[in-house]
Image (tube, rainbow, N blue to C red):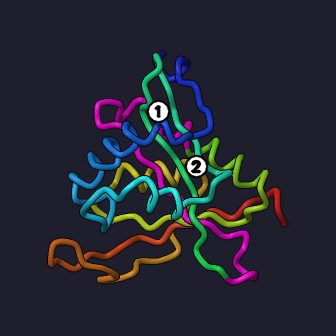
Amino acid sequence: MIIDKIILRSLNPNDWPTISKIYAEGIATGIATFETEVPTWEIWDNKFIKHCRIVAVQNDNVEGFAVLSLVSQRKVYSGVAEVTLYVAKDCWGKGIGKKLLMELINLSEAHGFWTLQAGIFPENVASIKLHENCGFRLVGVREKIGQRDGKWYDNHLMERRSDKIL
């Protein structure tokens, strides 16, 4: 099975050209992010937690990535982070997303994160199912939370509470 050949490792700056292409594919779907343009490496690098970044690699090709960002600068929320996960379009449905998300969960707990959250478009059924399969639950629907290309969109707020950090 192809998933057995996937290697997970820490993301590094040399991965950016491929990561930015994968992210662009997600943007193009219209249901993966409110963003409409790929940022520069510097902007992207500053947004995400340095020690919680992984890539899935097969045959020396990065096929997906998963990273965390803080939801708040307030100390009380220091263990709460938002998940960002993308898989290359030609690798969808091969289990790479689940492998990335499960490893990101383990990595987050090793670094003291007790709650992970994800904001997902309701139209992105595959992402919702992936998160559910990895222990996330629907907290609620944020109605018309943001606009993309002049259209308002709802967003499912999903979260996973660690059972290791009590």
Label 2 CA crowd tier, 10 Å (few <14, some 14–19, many 20+):
some
In the visual, does 32 lie left or right of 78? left
Residue type, numbered disc 1: Gly
Marks 1 and 2, how far apart in space?
A: 12 Å
Of residue 123 and residue 6, the one placed in the foreground of this image is 6
Of residue 18 and residue 4, the one placed in the foreground of this image is 18
Q: Residue at x 41, y 77 (%)?
A: 141
Residue type, numbered disc 2: Cys
Quadrant of the image containing the C terminus: bottom right
Q: Tell me if residue 125 comes above or below residue 33 in the rendering.
A: above
Q: Residue at x 22, y 59 (%)?
A: 30
Of residue 124 and residue 59, the one placed in the foreground of this image is 59
Disc number for residue 134: 2
Q: Horizontal and vertical percent for residue 77?
A: 70, 78
Whether the residues at callouts 1 and 2 have beta carbons within 8 Å, the answer is: no
Let me know if residue 86 is in the magenta part: yes
Residue where numbered disc 1 is placed: 95
Of residue 39 and residue 138, the one placed in the foreground of this image is 39
Dot 1 falls on a residue whose secondary structure is: loop
Q: Tell me if residue 144 comes above or below residue 93 in the rendering.
A: below
Q: Which residues are magenta?
A: 74-100
Let me know if residue 58 is in the magenta part: no
Q: Residue at x 27, y 55 (%)?
A: 27
